[in-house]
Image (tube, grey):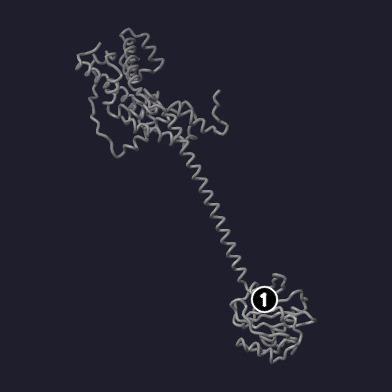
Amino acid sequence: MNCLDFRRRISAEPRSRDPALLAHRDSCTEGCAAFWQRAQRFEDDVEAAMAVPVPDGLADRILLAHATGERRAQVGRRRAWLAMAASVLIAFGGVGMLWRYSDQHSLPALAVAHMPWEMDSLALTRPMTDDQVEAGFVGRATHLKGPAPGMVTYVHDCTVGPYPAVHAVTRMDDEPVVALYMPGKMDGKPGTFHRDGWDGRELQLHGGTLVLLAQGASRKAMETAERGWRAAIEGPAPASIGQI
Amino acid sequence: MPTPPVKGDVNPKQRQYEAMVRALSADLYRFAWWLSRSETVAQDLVQETFLRAWKNLDALRDAESAKAWLFTILRREHARLYERKRLEVVELDDTLPEDAAYASPERSGDAAQVREAIGRLPDKYRAPLAMQVLGGMSADEIAESTGQKAGAVMTQLFRARQQLKKLLGGRAAAEGGRT
């Protein structure tokens, strides 16, 4: 390393501890040691000048701002979680209310809700004539296409929820079975149900929906009533090949 | 007897961050001050730098490189801040200084005069000088931080000091000279 390289390096990096620089400083007889000394003093001045005063409490203020920001973010995250939880609860609540509304307005629910006003009809035992039964259906602008079931003890036109209906009761082995026929209601959901102590069946017939209800009636009584009313409302089933 | 601060629930990241703020905020502030020449802007820059540092603290693997890392972040923050309102700086003569000024750095005067002279340096010289003097960064580290070649940084550091000496020498002469 020559003196020019040394001085250029020291002018750029006065605090360098590069062994090559230090070796040149210690061995040079051309005044590089003095140059190095002056450079160090100059650097002391530069360092002192650059050490501008730092505002009091700077670090604490930075930490406080940081802690505050973190806390705010934490509160924000907590609020977001709470909002999400509330949304989920509201959604569940909404779905629950919809389900409840839908359930309370289902045909089985409306049919069962209709029964408390008609409990006396279950106690009747005197059979009605076919004409009387037919007359009950005519009241709802419909006609029986087949013979009325045996042992019909009650026929009356009623309203089940919003639906006009023919309310009839058949009796078999002292087991009353209620039939609620809603002419024109074509969106029934066929199936069986048990609700508030009532066993029920919902049937989709050609001209409307039939709901059968009974309290503790036998399966045989329910099926007999179903067959009887189906044949009466839709007409006798066409003869099968075996019957021909 | 004073109650010691509760540190049980302070996680390692927070402890590292707090230690970093306490150890380096002063030098970082000085660097910011020399870049912006404004106490308010410098404080904002330091605040913003530590905010970014907190978000990227996982990227810091080595405690030794924390200072250079923070200086780099701060320099970028400053560049972002002044992207659209870069101040006009009067370029000084890049020629080598007179031997007299070069040979008599002790004439540099008190800190206020040196400070004023440093303030008159162009940004391109003052920034690497501050990174070296305040950040203890080598030319290679400054080069990496600023995206330049190490040789170019060496030249900037050399010229920064030469111009500083020239400025201080000229002032000393105008004031009747000092020894």
Tell me the residue that label 1 is attached to. A202
| Chain assignment, label 1 | A
Camera-side residue of B160 and A103: A103
The structure residue drawn at horizontal position 34% and vertical position 35%, both measured from the top left corner, is B79
Circle 1: element type: strand
Q: Is residue A185 left or right of residue A241?
A: left
Of residues A118 and B64, the one drawn nearer to the viewer in this rendering? A118
Residue B117 at x, y percent in the picture: 27, 23
Position of residue A170 relative to residue A78, above or below, is: below
State which quadrant residue B106 falls in.
Answer: top left
Residue B67 is left or right of residue B120, and the answer is: right
> How far across and down, in percent of the image, does residue A52 sit?
34, 24
Give the residue at x 69% y 87%.
Answer: A232
- Quadrant that contains the N terminus of chain B: top right
Image quadrant in which you'd find residue A124: bottom right
Residue located at (39% from left, 25% from top): B135
Question: Residue flagged by tag 1: what amino acid is it?
Answer: Glu
Q: Position of residue A108 (x, y in %)?
A: 65, 73
Percent coordinates x, y for residue A63 in the rendering: 46, 32
The image quadrant of residue B162 is: top left
Relative to A72, residue A32 above or below: above
